Image: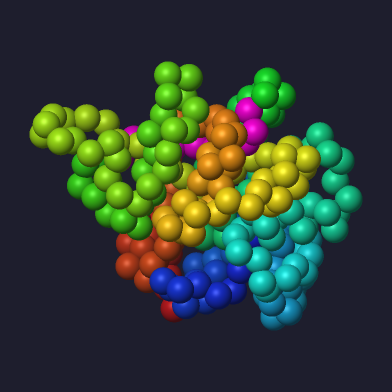
Amino acid sequence: MIIIPARLASTRFSQKILRLIDGEPMFVRTAKNAAKADDVIVACDDENVLEIARKYGLRAVMTSPNHASGTDRLNEAASALNLAAHDVVINVQADEPFFERENLLRFREFAREKITAGAFMASCYKLVSASAASDPNLVKVVLDKDSNALYFSRSLIPYPRGGEKREYYGHIGIYAYSVSNLKEFCAFNDRTLENTEKLEQLRALSAGKKIAMLKIATDSVGIDTYEDYIAAAEKFNFKTE
């Protein structure tokens, strides 16, 4: 199952999930796109967003507006849906309307395999250019020899102190967890690194948990800012507001 946390407030791009993509709100386009790969639930924090979701025929649940992260919202939705502890849920961000069906299907199978084998959660990444990696809006990840995440940062990591060329990995904000691991994640108390970088996955790493990472090739873009929105419109040829 895919759950899309649809938080209305956004500090970098006001109410971005309601921005139109060819006449439909962004979160609606994301949900419709994700539904090509699995069942989808939208986890809302605003009554108007809930009504919009239902207007478009989407399954949706209301969650608290006070959650610190999308994962906390996901946990409330999974609890409300009475999902089994072993069920694997995928968190697709509401600002990822172009993530390819084939990549979602591949990630779903990867996540199930890795979580069954002992990973706490799973996510994915792509190769990015050195210039793109310098953007603090693009989260980077470094990996161990088994492609588990060592650290995520908005800073340039690893830093090329010797000036050598190297590959940089851009994190794609799609996650998977079992329902029991999701509940455990939300009970972790150490959020120092998470609050510093504003990256919720650091909560799991701080607790010593393993995040399995899948390398993919994708043309999708996450829409974090208004500039991302305009760039996506040019790339995917859709009309903006």
Residue range in magenta is 119-128
x%, y% of residue 153? Answer: 38, 47
Task: State the quadrant of the N terminus.
Answer: top right
Nearest the camera: 68 or 168?
68
Question: Is residue 126 highlighted in magenta?
Answer: yes
Which of the 4 quarters of the picture holds residue 151? top left
Q: Is residue 11 visible?
A: yes
Q: What's the residue at 70%, 68% (across, down)?
A: 44
Q: Is residue 156 above or below residue 224?
A: above
Q: Is residue 231 above or below residue 35?
A: below
Nearest the camera: 217 or 214?
214
222 sits to left or right of 116: left
x%, y% of residue 119? Answer: 63, 28
What kind of colouring is applied to the model shown? rainbow
Q: What's the residue at 56%, 47% (across, down)?
A: 203
Question: Is residue 222 highlighted in magenta?
Answer: no
Task: State the quadrant of the C terminus.
Answer: bottom left
Q: Is residue 181 above or below residue 132?
A: above
Q: What's the residue at 42%, 63% (across, down)?
A: 224
Which of the 4 quarters of the picture holds residue 72? bottom right
x%, y% of residue 177? Answer: 68, 39
x%, y% of residue 33? Answer: 60, 52
Q: What's the residue at 51%, 31% (across, down)?
A: 213
Q: Is residue 233 visible?
A: no
219 sits to left or right of 116: left
